[in-house]
């Protein structure tokens, strides 16, 4: 028994050593960078939509991918983004399986990391699939309506969609509150930053994270409405959710502010790529 216990401990130690290896840590930082690129581009597209000119691109991941693809060496950059999302999936999976080694390894945190790993793996897969097929990625508006329609067709689907909408709303509120309380700073190596850099990163995290949470909550509201009305057409992807801000009393000015906030969150993601404590 002692031998087996020792072997198990040795395997766990080796696993955590691998999870903290330069390869896995670099993969995680590449993932934060890829996420930053997408958020900056989505923010820019949202601002352009508010000002009346987005060249027909949607303010979501598909629009960001299309914008990157149009640049010189666009396909090379898209492959780099796919690698970044794959790297994030690898790092998140290692954290979910091996733990952080910081005493914060409860099952809820592991489940959250596993969910993030699966999401980033999906982003990587969908982008690679689009590149190999020579086409763009699917619009978030189309995906949202299709998935909502599918689930509404299941037994109890209306309740499931409603629960999903509430979950997204709560997630958005939690993200916004945690950003306002600067909870993110605990995961950053702030000691390696100068005073001005620390202030700038804090501002990016608070403002960008707060706007991101607002957009999440807004998308959740539309999913909830789709469930209550039993109408999948009421569900909105990121693009339509952002456009809905321009339809408020504040008009396009609000969409400009939201777009700038998302771009700031993208910049904060770049800061995470530099200073996030990866274990």
Image (cartoon, grey):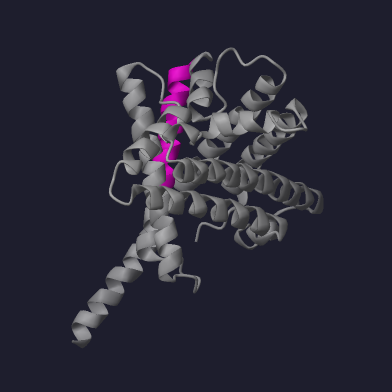
Q: Nearer the viewer, residue 248 or 6?
A: 248
Please, is residue 263 above or below residue 157 in the view?
above
The answer to whether residue 86 is magenta is yes
Residue farthest to the right? 196
Q: Position of residue 174 (x, y in %)?
A: 60, 57
Could you tell me which residue is drawn at 36 percent across and 36 percent down?
149
67 lies left or right of 261: left
Q: Nearer the viewer, residue 226 or 36?
A: 226
Q: Is residue 27 magenta?
A: no
Q: Is 81 on the left or on the right of 245, as rendered?
A: left
Q: Is 172 displayed left or right of 258 in the figure? A: left
Percent position of residue 77, x then y? 47, 24
Q: Which residues are magenta?
A: 73-89
Going 43% across and 57% down the picture, which residue do you hit?
113
Q: Vertically, is 64 above or below 238?
A: above
Chief secondary structure of the magenta portion: helix
Would you identify the image quadrant in which residue 241 lies? Answer: top right
Residue lying farthest to the front in this orientation: 229
**Residue 189 seen anywhere in this rendered image of the structure:** no
The correct choice, above or below, for 129 with respect to 151 in the image is above
The residue that appears at 18% across and 87% down in the rendered structure is 1
């Amino acid at each position: 028994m002692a031998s087996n216990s020792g072997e198990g401990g040795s395997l766990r130690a080796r696993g955590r050593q691998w999870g903290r290896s330069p390869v896995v840590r670099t993969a995680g930082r590449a993932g934060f960078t890829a996420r930053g690129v997408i958020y900056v581009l989505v923010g820019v597209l949202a601002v352009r939509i508010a000002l009346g000119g987005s060249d027909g691109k949607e303010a979501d991941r598909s629009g960001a991918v299309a914008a990157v693809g149009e640049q010189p060496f666009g396909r090379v950059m898209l492959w780099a983004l796919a690698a970044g999302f794959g790297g994030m999936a690898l790092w998140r999976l290692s954290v979910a399986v091996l733990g952080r080694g910081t005493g914060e390894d409860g099952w809820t945190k592991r489940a959250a990391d596993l969910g993030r790993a699966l999401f980033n793996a999906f982003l990587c897969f969908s982008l690679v699939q689009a590149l190999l097929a020579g086409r763009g990625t699917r619009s978030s508006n189309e995906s949202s309506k299709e998935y909502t329609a599918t689930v509404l067709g299941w037994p109890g689907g209306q309740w499931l969609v409603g629960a999903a909408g509430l979950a997204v709303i709560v997630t958005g509120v939690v993200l916004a509150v945690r950003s306002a309380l600067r909870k993110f700073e605990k995961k950053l190596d702030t000691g390696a930053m100068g005073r001005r850099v620390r202030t700038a990163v804090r501002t990016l995290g608070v403002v960008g994270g707060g706007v991101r949470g607002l957009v999440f909550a807004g998308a959740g509201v539309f999913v909830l409405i789709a469930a209550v009305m039993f109408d999948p057409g009421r569900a909105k992807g990121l693009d339509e959710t952002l456009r809905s801000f321009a339809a408020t009393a504040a008009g396009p000015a609000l969409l400009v502010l939201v777009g700038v906030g998302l771009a700031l969150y993208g910049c904060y993601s770049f800061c995470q790529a530099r200073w996030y404590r990866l274990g």
